[in-house]
């Protein structure tokens, strides 16, 4: 019987701030648990699943895969300053939807799956069930959803305020009364 609690720490990476936070957390967990870090970047063909299956698109898909591999390398640079040298890393770049790809990758008995939790409460999140939600619902291994960092939340808030200011400034250049700035979802 194997005594190791966690053998692999699988983490979803897409280059977003939330996934970089998840990558940092996953690397720390892999170190703590003496586990293998398995960063996974799922990529999709711009033409959809059918476009990616056409025989004439094999070269096109290999080019897209190279871009995805570059994105994964950049995520390591931006999130960790480069690939960790103090723990084993097995990076995977897989064509497919992120949620199913992560669930299928983290399929071993001693896997731990880590995903970025992303934003809550936005229209975009309501319309598109998030990868984290999919993994929490379908994974057979433990899943940790890492919330955005406080800095990430502050940047989102700043961006929203900046958009409101820009709206008023743009409107002030036009003749007539000043319109009210658009309300953010947080203000409602």
Image: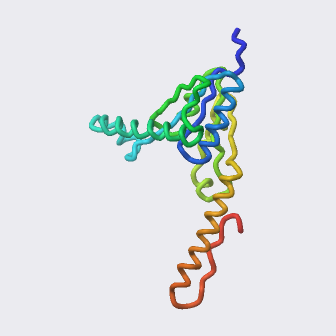
User: Which residue is at a point 53% across and 44% down the rendered structure image?
Assistant: 15
Asked if residue 10 is positioned above or below residue 158 in the image, the reply reads: above
Residue 75 lies left or right of residue 182; in this view the side is left
Which x, y percent locates residue 152?
65, 53
- Residue most toward the left? 56
Front residue (pair 169, 143): 169
Asked if residue 15 is positioned above or below residue 32 in the image, the reply reads: below
Front residue (pair 47, 83): 83
Count of residue discs: 0
Q: Quadrant of the N terminus?
A: top right
Which x, y percent locates residue 104?
55, 29
- Residue most toward the bottom? 176
Which x, y percent locates residue 103?
58, 32
User: Which residue is at a point 56% across and 79% down the rendered structure image?
Assistant: 169
User: Which residue is at a point 60% across and 30% down the rendered structure image?
Assistant: 10
Which x, y percent locates residue 16?
56, 47
Q: Quadrant of residue 82?
A: top right
Asked if residue 140 is positioned above or below residue 21 in the image, the reply reads: above
User: Which residue is at a point 35% across and 35% down the rendered structure image?
Assistant: 62
Colour logic: rainbow
Residue 43 lies left or right of residue 119; in this view the side is left
Q: Quadrant of the C terminus?
A: bottom right
């Amino acid at each position: 019987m194997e005594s190791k609690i966690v053998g692999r720490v699988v983490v979803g990476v897409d280059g977003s701030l939330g996934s970089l936070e998840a990558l940092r957390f996953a690397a720390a967990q892999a170190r703590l648990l003496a586990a293998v870090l398995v960063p996974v970047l799922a990529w999709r063909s711009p033409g959809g699943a059918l476009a990616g299956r056409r025989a004439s698109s094999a070269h096109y898909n290999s080019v897209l895969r190279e871009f995805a591999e570059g994105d994964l390398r950049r995520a390591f640079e931006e999130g960790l300053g480069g690939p960790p040298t103090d723990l084993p890393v097995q990076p995977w770049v897989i064509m497919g939807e992120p949620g199913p790809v992560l669930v299928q990758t983290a399929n071993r008995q001693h896997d731990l799956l880590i995903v970025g939790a992303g934003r809550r409460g936005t229209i975009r999140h309501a319309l598109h069930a998030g990868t984290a939600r999919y993994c929490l619902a379908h994974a057979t291994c433990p899943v940790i959803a890492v919330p955005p960092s406080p800095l990430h939340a502050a940047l989102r808030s700043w961006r929203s305020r900046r958009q409101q200011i820009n709206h008023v400034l743009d409107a002030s250049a036009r003749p007539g009364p000043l319109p009210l700035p658009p309300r953010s979802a947080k203000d409602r």
